[in-house]
């Protein structure tokens, strides 16, 4: 069975399919954050740190969006600030560095997800990188 057939068989209610999508999304989000951090900080900061940042960032994004997402403009802005805050907490350099890491992570996740989408492997989403 090919990867494409496996992914197409997995419905949203399938626990194995959901786990697969969760893991792929988490790894893509972590890879994107790791890429952004390495470019901005200019040293290897570890992939594990990126996985933790992606996971915690996704949880924080979800919580802030749940409570404040209904407020036009302010809700999404608070969610982005909270997500950047997680990156700021996990990486050295301050808020400006964290924002740049976030921007590069978003671009990297978008490119990776587009390539995976074109290959027919996954839908376009990444856990830990908002809007990607």
Image: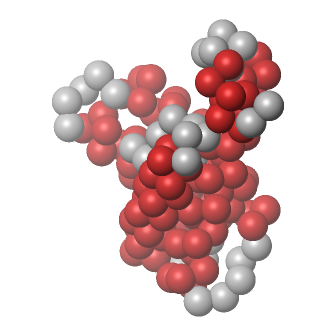
Q: Residue at x 48, y 47 (%)?
A: 118
Residue 46 at x, y percent in the picture: 76, 73
Q: Is residue 9 visible?
A: yes
Front residue (pair 45, 12): 12
Residue 62 at x, y percent in the picture: 51, 31
Residue 86 at x, y percent in the picture: 56, 55
Q: Is residue 18 visible?
A: no
Query: What residue occupies the far left of the structure in this picture?
Result: 72
* Quadrant of the rendered image containing residue 26: top right
Q: Is residue 14 left or right of residue 65?
A: right
Position of 89 relative to 28 (above/below): below
Front residue (pair 72, 12): 12
* Quadrant of the rendered image containing residue 107: bottom left
Q: Residue at x 53, y 72 (%)?
A: 36
Q: Is residue 114 left or right of residue 75?
A: right
Question: How many discs mark residues in the rendered view?
Answer: 0
Q: Is residue 107 left or right of residue 30?
A: left
Query: What residue occupies the far bottom of the structure in this picture?
Result: 42
Report the quarter where the N terminus lies: top right
């Amino acid at each position: 069975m090919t990867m494409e057939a496996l992914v197409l068989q997995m419905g949203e209610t399938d626990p194995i399919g959901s786990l697969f999508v969760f893991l792929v999304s988490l790894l893509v989000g972590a890879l994107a954050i790791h890429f952004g951090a390495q470019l901005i900080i200019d040293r290897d900061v570890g992939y594990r740190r990126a996985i933790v940042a992606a996971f915690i960032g996704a949880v924080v994004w979800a919580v802030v969006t749940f409570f404040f997402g209904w407020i036009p403009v302010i809700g999404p802005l608070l969610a982005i600030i909270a997500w950047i805050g997680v990156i700021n907490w996990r990486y050295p350099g301050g808020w400006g560095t964290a924002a740049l890491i976030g921007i590069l992570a978003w671009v990297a996740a978008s490119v990776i997800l587009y390539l995976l989408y074109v290959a027919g492997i996954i839908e376009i989403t990444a856990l830990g990188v908002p809007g990607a």
